[in-house]
Amino acid sequence: MKEALHVIDNDVITLPNSTTTDEVSNLKKLAEKNLFHCPYCKAKLIVKYGDEKGLYFSHMHSEACEESRKIDKAEKKYKKQIERETKVHQVIQAILHDELTTQAKNNPQLEVNYGYKAKPSLKEYPDIWVRIGNREFAISVVTNVTSTADSNLSNQISKRHQTFLEHGMEPIWFIEKKEQSIEKDKNSIVLWDAELTIAAKTTEDQEWDSILSDVVKDEMFFTYFNYPVSHGHLSIDVRSMYYIYSNGDRIVVKVQRLLKDRIEKPYRAFLLNEGYEIPFADALVIKNGFVLSKPEIDQHEREDFLKRYQHLRDEYHEKLRVKEAEQQKVLQEANEQEERLKAAREEEQNCKHQLRQEMIKQRGTSNIPRKMNYEELKSLLRVNINLIQREQMELWSTMPGLRHNYQFVWDLVVENKCKSFDELRPILQTALSKRR
């Protein structure tokens, strides 16, 4: 049976991946002196080396104990479980294990192991299993999320997450940062199914819930942030994402707080902050559990968020006030323009009326019939029926038939209360037919 970790005088070691012939020979001699023992049944182990398996420990006569066979079977299942992961997954898992193992040396309440070794009977395994006092944690890392694999991965994670809970473990998930997708202009984060599944609920998230429960009562709250909220009555449920990545020569965790919103594709959540980085070692600080945050930073970010909300609210309402004032000004100018046009029309009508009255008065009071000329007729018709050039020519063509009696034409306009040449035309035609 090939072993990954082994015991030498109660110290855990890892066999080298590549060794020289002398090193193999030396390890075999140490094994002959009963230096290596199975960590499960405590039986003597021997050292073997081959081209296919490399260097490994084995029970005597290759008769592995029951516990070793169980672990070996669990390891194969675990390797199949993580086939989809990238090499980054292996690196992060190794760093996680090293960091926690180092802490365990100085903390008797801390116990660390690989998930498949700590819980070989499970169907799903965390990458790292941790016990702190009477609490158990299942730590897992997710990489290589793609659009084609996302739904299946989400189902796997949900199943794994539930398995951990059912077996008394508190799940902790880290996700590779390259999967993060933020819409800054909409103050939102767009999530994979897998991300939505592993979003955690922490004490800091509950603090966020408290301050949001008041501010979201403002009906325009999401409008201030330009966030396309999926519905009007969003339940307050702040969650955390832990993105892990390399920053220069160190591994860091980005803590991202978000307000769950859209649970239909595309999955979108309201972004509460830009997130903050903490060194990987700090994220794994243990105080009865994993801290996974910097409470003082979270408090500062909540205060900044409230200030930002107040600023955006005031800015929005000021813009609204200016816009309403501009619209009111435009409306007032339009009303004033309408009043001026109305006054001009009334004045024009008064002028026309006065002119008609004057003509009627002159005609009715004069003992000597006044002879109207064509220019006077045109002037009167332009004012009273808006006579245009084309209509003037048409009118002029009818005048010989009326014996150039311009006064007669004007009398027809007044008597019939004509408003346009179209109304006057049939009246002229009737008068012409009578003259013939």
Image: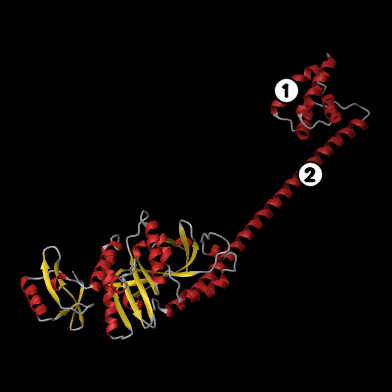
Name the one closer to the observer, 127 or 65.
Answer: 65
Report whether residue 16 is seen.
no
Q: Please state which amino acid type lies under the numbered disc 1.
A: Glu
Q: Please state which amino acid type lies under the numbered disc 2.
A: Glu
Q: Is residue 398 above or below residue 30?
A: above
Residue drawn at the location 62% of the way across and 58% of the way down: 326
Q: Position of residue 408 (x, y in %)?
A: 84, 24
* Residue at the disc numbered 1: 394
Res 315 → quadrant: bottom right
Report whether residue 386 is seen.
yes
Residue drawn at the location 6% of the way across and 74% of the way down: 25
Q: Position of residue 210 (x, y in %)?
A: 53, 75
Residue drawn at the location 49% of the way across and 72% of the way down: 305
Residue 240 shown left or right of residue 113 in the figure: right
Residue 178 shown left or right of residue 268 in the figure: left
Residue 361 shown left or right of residue 194 in the figure: right
Q: CA distance from mark 1 to mark 2?
A: 30 Å
**Label 1: how many residues lie within 10 Å, few (<14), some (14-19) or many (20+)?**
few
Name the one closer to the observer, 248 or 30.
Answer: 30
* Residue at the disc numbered 2: 346
